[in-house]
Image: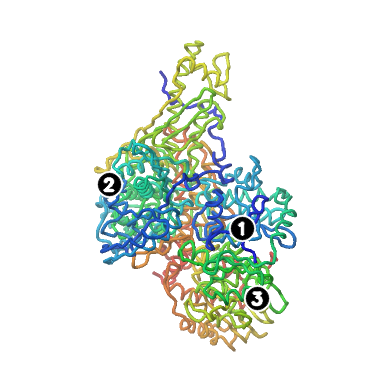
Amino acid sequence: MPPSDTMIPEAELTVVRKPLPHDSAPRHVTGSAAYIDDIREMAGTLHLAPGYAPIAAGRIIDLDLAAVRAAPGVVAVLTAEDIPGANDISPKLIGDDPALATGEIRFHGQVVFVVVAETRDQARRAAKKAKFKTEATAPVIDVDQASDTVLPDYAFTRGDPDAAVAGAPVSFSDTFRIGGQEHFYLEGQISMAIPGEAGEMLVYASTQHPSEVQHLVSHALHIPSSAVTVEIRRMGGGFGGKESQASQWAVLAALAAWKTGQPCKMRLDREDDMIMTGKRHDFRVDYSVGHDENGLLKGVDVALHARCGHSEDLSMGVVDRTMFHADNSYFYPECRVLTRRHRTNTVSNTAFRGFGGPQGMVFAERMMDQIAYRLGKDPLDVRKANFYAPGRDLTPFGQQVTDNLLHELVGELEVKSDYRARRAEISAWNAESRILKRGLALTPVKFGISFTLMPLNQAGALVHLYRDGSLHLNHGGTEMGQGLFLKVAQVVAEEFGVDIGKVAITATRTDKVPNTSPTAASTGTDLNAMAALNACGQIKDRLYAFIEEKWQVRRNQVKFREGQVFLGNRAMPLAELVNAAYMERVQLSAAGFYKTPKIAWNRDKAEGRPFFYFAYGASCSEVTIDTMTGEMKVDRVDVLHDVGKSINPAIDIGQIEGGFVQGMGWLTTEELVWDAQGRLRTHAPSTYKIPAASDIPEHFRVELYESDGAREKTIYRSKAVGEPPLMLPISVWCAIANAVAAVRPGGVPKLDAPATPEAIMKAVRAMLAGD
Amino acid sequence: MRETIRFVRRGQIVEISNFDPMTTLLDHLRLAEGATGTKEGCGEGDCGACTVAIGRTVKDRVVYEPVNACIQLLGMVDGAEIVAVEDLAEGSALHPVQSAMVEKHGSQCGFCTPGFVMSLFTLYQSTEGPVTRSTINDWIAGNLCRCTGYRPIVEAAVAACSGERADRFRTANADTAGILSFLNDERDVFIGDDQRFFAAPASIDGLAALYEQHPSAVIVSGATDVGLWITKQLRDIPKIIHIGRVPGLDGIEDTGRELLIGAAATYADVEPYARAIDPDLGELFRRIGSKQVRASGTVGGNVANGSPIGDTPPALIALGATLELRRGTRSRVMPVEEFYIDYGKQNRASGEFVTGLMIPHLKEGQVFRCYKVTKRFDQDISSVMGAFSFTLAADGTVREARIAYGGMAGIPKRAKGAESALLGASIRDSAVWSKAFAALKEDFTPMSDHRASAAYRAETAHALLGKALLEAAGAPTSRTRLIGRREALHAAE
């Protein structure tokens, strides 16, 4: 019996590889695509608003909620005491992250109570009326102040890095800072819970991880997981911010629904959302490097200090991934990659597109730049010299790089972007320009694909084939704009040879596909499309058997194409075949499953193969800075990115461009500022600046790298595309450093991230002072 | 007296007589109408997800402008047509801007998309023929997208606006204009009672009398600031007086010697006039807020609310602008700089309100420069804003220097020390520049906040003065600035 997950041969593909528009696009543009807040409310739906203490650290001595309860429209005010089960929203159920804080306050914005009122406006206004008596302690804001950690230190060590650095012809040490990032999904956090009979709870949650929401709601209400159903049709953006941190609002909405017996909805105001939910981890990086006269690395010793916030959340996986990518594309002969995960009195930092990887890679690229500037070489030459290559292909965590595209891909972009000629032209221009300086940089990306927590590398799907030949598709992946639903549907349509419109794309629901992994780590298509393919294969296997029995045509002579089934010399509409199969009592529905092969990772021993494969890319960016004010403009960007063989090139280009701009924002305009009292001061789009249309250069050219596709057997030889592009704009940041370097040729720029005007001025000043 | 507001929705006149004065247009659409296509992204007019088009008659034609429904008060749309994202398609036939967005892959998560569609709709209505990249960038600067990186949206705009404009809104324009002109009567609007009301007087005398009677009322023009008092600060504002229906208060007149601006004139309306005074002033206006904010917000409001980082006051002060205040039947005029007393405190009596501004044209020998330094170029509030006016004799002697900064003190403020250091000296004398820089240090003690540190502010204030002096001494702005280069702006004229 042949495997039930055989893919259609390349030459016969009709739906896969097509640049189809997002399945919801016509509904997006007409306003008819419903997000949770758009679902028509049932009569009696109540609304929640959170209340929090005015301090970042300390204790609540007394909480007077009388005025809150007496406010117009208030139906209930709930505190931790009202939770029948576990007061815990930590992803690992370790109890370090309460849904509602009790005596101790661990960050400014930690929710202490929720108001349940007839309208959202009433709930918000009532929440303001709480009277807190608190005993504040001095908050620990950043890693410099921190003394406690949320997890033990963890390191990859190879050889004797101390000796390698000390014994190298050239060595240096430095320290720098990498800022965090707010997700700024356009749709804020939201959940709506509807109580059912027999203690059941239906929860609509804008979450990347419906199964986790299901489990946490069941724990909080002390009911079985089977009593809780979580549904999400689409999110208005996620980016990692709705992986673990969507749970709290779902738990609170479910708690209120449990208490009141009425449907309850909790939609955070943007300001609350930004104050109460975690962000990308910010870092201080301390490092020592040894290299030879050509810039070839001898030893790297780096300590990456992450601000994790008040609880663990996903900091194990996130900061591990910083370590997995602290090499980016470069071979470190001897090295120590150490991470410390600091506990602070700030919101618990969490997943964000790239999941810690970008911070490790920014370090690697800064190190490459500094080696080049010290040696008076072009940074691109130093980068290329240090690329993984045959004989130099073992990562610090022991996985061999076997699918290396760095040399070919970067070489191609170097030519396409006209790097060398522009380098010469810019140098000449800078020599003549006193105030404005231009910079150019070309940086690579190598990103490992798979969850490094091994059990998550599995997925389920559910496919129904109806008697009219239409298909119903469901799987554990969630749609947050990345086009996952469409890509999986393309695979299903291809299997049955039908038009994409024949495949009904349906909301993710925990009662259809259970025990799902979060839609994260760029694995959405890799896992779910494979699971769907498997489900299709099972149905097709049954149809093949039916055909063989009924018409004596062997499966290798059967083709599903153009809505028809071709069997030998005969052809019939798919519906006719399906109906005939139904009449003979053939099962036309299947639950598919997939688990990523070949991977294994033992964290305790730091050995194994955590990644199924690597995705590659490179970008070349040119900027101009104003050395009087620190203002910066991106003038040109060229990108070449490897998605294997694309399932949908339009969707993939969209992911690359969007990821690029989001990463560019992280490294340039997006700055998170907390005050000494631990209050986030940049808690709104008026103060936190994500890129706008005019920040994108007119020349912004993104191309897919042409290849035979992923070396491993991925779905139609495609590669993951969600996260890798986020790190492409490190070239923008390096180009800014390059422009700063032009202020004093021979100097070594020291730029922090994000490169705001103020950070650029700081680097310019340091250059002028000869630091 | 009219005790209802009236507006046009989908060709029908809607009349509402019972609503709280603080009701926003967004809440009306989503909660009262159930029209959930329009989204709330931030609730403060900064993301554009809630953008709707407001049609009003200008010279017998309906002109559609984008506004942020989240901070637009419902009462303010009296007499207008409201077009939301659900209203564009006819059955399954998408509007050209919608089909372009689909074809160019302009949506990913889709949450910002309705706002973009409505911004592009107003672009489609407001222009003829192809549109440039910079026009599009400016038009959508107030719409944030976190997914696409904007390129496909820009391409959708180019595609939708490439051919002849033809849609049913254009076809129906004259009819709609007729309905709107019928709605725009000259009756005072008053909804509510003495304790809680939304009022929109239809005469300046009516406005003055009402405000004298209710000095605790809040006057709104565009509500781009007051809207946030409601949605973010959750203040209770029981009495709201909207000045948008007062005839003539939105007037703009260029006498050739001076520009007269009514208190209700929007940034958008003033921008071309400001540009005619000086390209830098025009560019400053272009960079205030977003298209949506500029379509609602007013220069009068920007001056009157007294923000320390309001972007127009430093420029107005440097140009020697004056403002007119009125209380009851009495009016007075004062230089803009005298209006600002201290942080949050203005030279304005109870019941007194701003009626207009006067900006003098540049005189012979007068050089004007202003610079806005921000984290993001478009739709950001300045960390430092500097405005400079030097009146030079033919030999380059500084006859008058007016230098004003925003973001450097609790109020927009002149750099008197730096000004006097330059007075009477040659604009090209670098020794005098050094004196001016030293004096500037004494002029201000800036603060650190989330926009910038005190040290960066001081350093940037110095840099901006340096830039202004360099340019006044003849340096081309192509060598001194990244954006807003005057050579390009002149060429575009």
Q: How far apart are labels 2 and 3 at the CA level?
A: 64 Å
The amino acid type of the residue labelled 1 equals Pro
The residue positioned farthest toward the bottom in the image shown: B424
For disc 1, the chain is B
Q: How far apart are labels 2 and 1 at the CA level?
A: 48 Å
Provide the secondary structure element on which disc 3 rests.
helix
Provide the secondary structure element on which disc 2 rests.
loop
The amino acid type of the residue labelled 3 equals Asp
Q: How far apart are labels 3 and 1 at the CA level?
A: 30 Å
**Is the C-beta separation of discs 2 and 1 under 8 Å?**
no
Which scheme is used to colour this image of the protein?
rainbow
Q: Quadrant of residue A696?
A: bottom right
For disc 2, the chain is A
Residue B326 horizontal/vertical position (percent): 61, 79
Q: Mark 2 = which residue?
A: A86
Q: Does label 1 lie on the same chain as label 2?
A: no
Q: Mark 3 = which residue?
A: B205
Q: Is residue A767 above or below residue B27?
A: below
The tag earlier along the polypeptide, 3 or 1, is 1
**Identity of the residue drawn at 33% across and 54% down:** A348
Residue A324, disc:
none
Q: Which of the two discs, 2 and 1, sits closer to the camera? A: 2
For disc 3, the chain is B
Does residue A373 appear in this view? no
Residue B66, disc:
1
Does residue A542 appear in this view? yes
Residue A616 horizontal/vertical position (percent): 45, 44
Give the side of residue B257 with respect to residue A295, left or right.
Answer: right
- Of residues A139 and A391, the one nearer the viewer is A139
